[in-house]
Image (tube, rainbow, N blue to C red):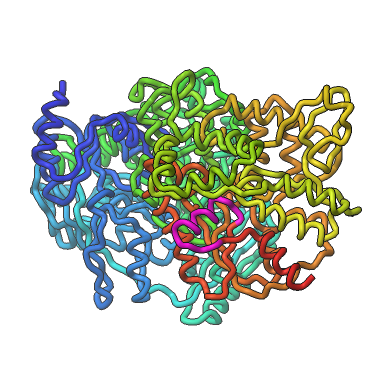
Amino acid sequence: MTDLRELRAGLRAGVRGEVDFGVTARALTTMDASNYRRVPLGVVSPRDADDVAATLAVCREHGVPVVPRGGGTSIAGQATGTGVVLDLTRHMNRLLSLDPETRTAVVQPGLVLDRLQEAAAPHGLRFGPDPSTHSRCTLGGMIGNNSCGSHSVAWGTTADNVRELSVITPRGERLRPGPGWAGAPAGLRELVEGELARLRTGFPELPRRISGYALDALLPERGADVARSFCGSEGTLGVLTEAVVELVRAPRARALAVLAYADESGAAEAAAGLLAHRPLTVEGMAADLVPASVDLPRGGAWLFVETGGDTEGEARARAETIVRAADVVDSLVVTDPARQRVLWRIREDASGTATRMPDGTEAWPGWEDCAVPPARLGAYLRDFRGLLAAHGLRGAPYGHFGDGCIHVRIDFDLLTEPGIARFRTFSGELADLVVAHGGSLSGEHGDGQARAELLPRMYGPEMVALFERVKGVWDPDDLLNPGMLVRPEPLDANLRFAVLPREPVDVAFGYPADGGDFSAAVRRCVGVAKCRTESVSGPAVMCPSFRATGREEHSTRGRARLLHEMLAGELVTDGWRSTEVRDALDLCLSCKGCRSDCPVGVDMATYKAEFLHHHYAGRRRPAAHYAMGRLPLWLGWVARTRSAALVNAGASVAPLARAAKRLGGIAGEREIPRLAGEPFTRWWRGRRAAVPAGSGALVVLWPDTFTEHLSPSVGRAAVRVLEAAGLRVALPPTLRLAGARSPVGDARSRSALRLLSARRGRVCCGLTYISTGQLDRARAVLRRTLDLMEPVLATDAPVVVLEPSCAATLRTDAPELLHDDPRAAQLAARVRTFAETLEQYAPDWTPPSLDRPVAGQTHCHQHAVLGDTADRRLRAAAGLTGDLSGGCCGLAGDFGFERGHYEVSVACAEDQLLPAVRQAPRNALILADGYSCRTQLAQLADVRGRHLAEALAEALEENP
């Protein structure tokens, strides 16, 4: 039995990088993007090749397996293990050199593919293979799996683009694999030369044959290329420490032909015929993976065929030639790069979106990427569909039709014994079907545990025995990634769902998309790790905390992994009281970016609120939860006592401000915001007494806490604009009257005779209570709000919410928290943003002309929950040009004010918001509809951000 103390001590003595045997590090690496789970002993993050060699030496001495790991996006289980995980992403992640003349680059294994592409782009170059995970997968992982991507019809697999490798064998030998037997371990050449006949006849000829070891690359007629044969070995032969890769010339212009077919079989049968035109891609997908909102040519399935050229015209001409040659139902040729990115994003997100069937049923990898000769793809798909039907299974195929490689997630039942038995039976029958069509069990992602058991069906027992002998030459101690490729574990062992509770966990939120099951919600994260991107483009938000720290535990995936282990109870043993889960969630901004940007809709903000609710049940909370989590309560007291001036005066005295921040758990670097001298509703009552209500359509303006107490100018501006648009503005009632309905429109009751039966209160969405996990209080606040809103719900008036975070809370969190109260769903359906209200209820109104560029940031909750289509149209109608950035401002309600969060808050602001504002033209209007965004701009950049309502109201004042 391994002595963990001796192992840990030996590693720490010999390795300069991090050695972490803690619960968090281990929990984060129990899974990759597959169906499998293994609990490692510890994680080592080597700084260089010497650290790798030292780790191998210590683990060999103790008989402990080693698993090299990159981005952890492998889909067959090969990035998991029970020994020591080598995390090659933390330090060994550099681009060492790039030579435009020879078109080569020297990379470390932990380098993310997109970083290489960014460095190569100024030279007109790129690395050819580009998996859909290009924003987070690493070069080492691509070499380990022989990854391909959508451009493989033009530029091949990773093995086709590798020139030379630097590898450390399990016994510490440093080799430089390359052509001509360069870098071969002792005994490999003799073994291969004794098996030439078998190697010449035992491998199917097809472009996407990834399964098994690529021993045919060692044939003399193929250059005896040891580097090429090492590609796809899944970390079982040696540890890669460096690679020389080849770059290709990128076309200066591209066009995308979208070819529509009646069904996927039609698209599959057409794909091979397009290869003669030398396209860059021939990707296919069917309607069941395409959002209804996407504007594609009419049809049931599509091929995405990309062409290149020196000019846009040349690329378009090639695309149009392909359209003419294709027998299509309909077609579209796109040359606009932004539109192309939107379309490609649909294809790239399919690995996540495919994990949920249209009815919400879960679907899983396992038979993710079989490949057959392209000319047989149509026939194979028909047989594949028939096999699914015979087993009562469903799946949505998509993928690299031009290479005959199909990705699919299938709705296996991996939670019950009968379901797992069917998974096993189906896997064997599908393997036989693939082989019957001359295919490969893996066409991109490797065999791992998912398919290695079935390799004898593809290669026969003699070839598999040869694989074992080759493994023995490289790794005689079976140290590296045992159980993968050779001598594999059963494909139905180590399933990651086996450890989860079988009964639903008692939770506060309803989780309607997951049948009320918190375990099912956590299972949404399949590990494709889109949250681990180091940069975002366009309006994307997820995951700002990971971009700020670069640490896995601060990604959406990392937090989901910890929650998974919390539910499992094997590694994280103290359940809801877990400090490991609490610490990982602490830097979650609750931006909700994952709700929209994660391909499977993980909602970590909700999971965080749920966890905090249970974690602090019956216990003292952090000071910030009382100070800022109950902000509506404190600000209400200030308003009732009319003490805003006194509070502001105290906050301006440095010693008092320091004491208040210390007491309230507020970061010392933060300024305490000033309170408004006159709350919005007080201004409203005075104005309503002097100005009678209009006669237009009724809209109810929601007086959220921030508008009410901190920025009433936004409320006043909204009233000005809404009334200018011909709408009649009202505020929600503040009295609930027994046996009668209170009036809508004056924020109070005029009937003093009925006051004895009334209960006073103010509407509130409960946002601050929810974000701090005070869910019992949030429920009470929301029920009181629904009582007050009953008169409004009896009308058909929309509820206009100016603060995006409050609108998002009412639209999603409230009905999910009060899932037993139908009024919450009724209120959610009434919620409108400021721009939506004008568009839907004053469609003929023309806004004043501002004629200025804009800069700033779309509020993260608006992006994730509400959408900004109406805002974009309103800005365009007002003559405002340009787009707002994505990301999160970093203040995120109470997050950026809480002690210990300041540095991460600033880093989040520096990711998108502050650079966008600094680069804006001098006459740009800085838009920020969220109070947090405006506060962050004021405190970090001394810039005044404005709500769109304020900008329009000012223009109306200038030009009535």
Number of numbered tags placed on the structure image: 0
Could one spot residue 830 in this view of the protein? yes
Per the picture, the main secondary structure of the magenta-coloured stretch is helix
User: In percent of the image, x 31 and y 62: which residue is there?
Assistant: 160
- Residue 164 falls left or right of residue 171: right
Looking at the rendered image, the quarter that the C terminus falls into is: bottom right
Measuring from the top left, give residue 324's x and y in whole percent: 63, 73
Measuring from the top left, give residue 680's x and y in whole percent: 70, 48
7 up-or-down from 893: above or below: above
- Residue 695 falls left or right of residue 658: right
- Residue 879 falls left or right of residue 117: right
Could one spot residue 359 in this view of the protein? no
Q: Is residue 285 magenta?
A: no
Of 460 and 176, the residue lying toward us: 176
User: In percent of the image, x 13 and y 53: which residue is there?
Assistant: 184
Could you say which quadrant of the image residue 639 lies in? top right
Report the span colored magenta: 929-944
Q: Residue furthest right?
A: 695
Q: Is residue 942 magenta?
A: yes
51 up-or-down from 477: above or below: below
User: In percent of the image, x 52 and y 54: which residue is there?
Assistant: 935
Of 733 and 455, the residue lying toward us: 733
User: In percent of the image, x 46 and y 81: which residue is there?
Assistant: 310
- Residue 391 falls left or right of residue 156: right
Looking at the rendered image, the quarter that the N terminus falls into is: top left
189 up-or-down from 277: above or below: above
Measuring from the top left, give residue 40's x and y in whole percent: 27, 31
Of 584 and 287, the residue lying toward us: 584
Measuring from the top left, give residue 56's x and y in whole percent: 13, 40
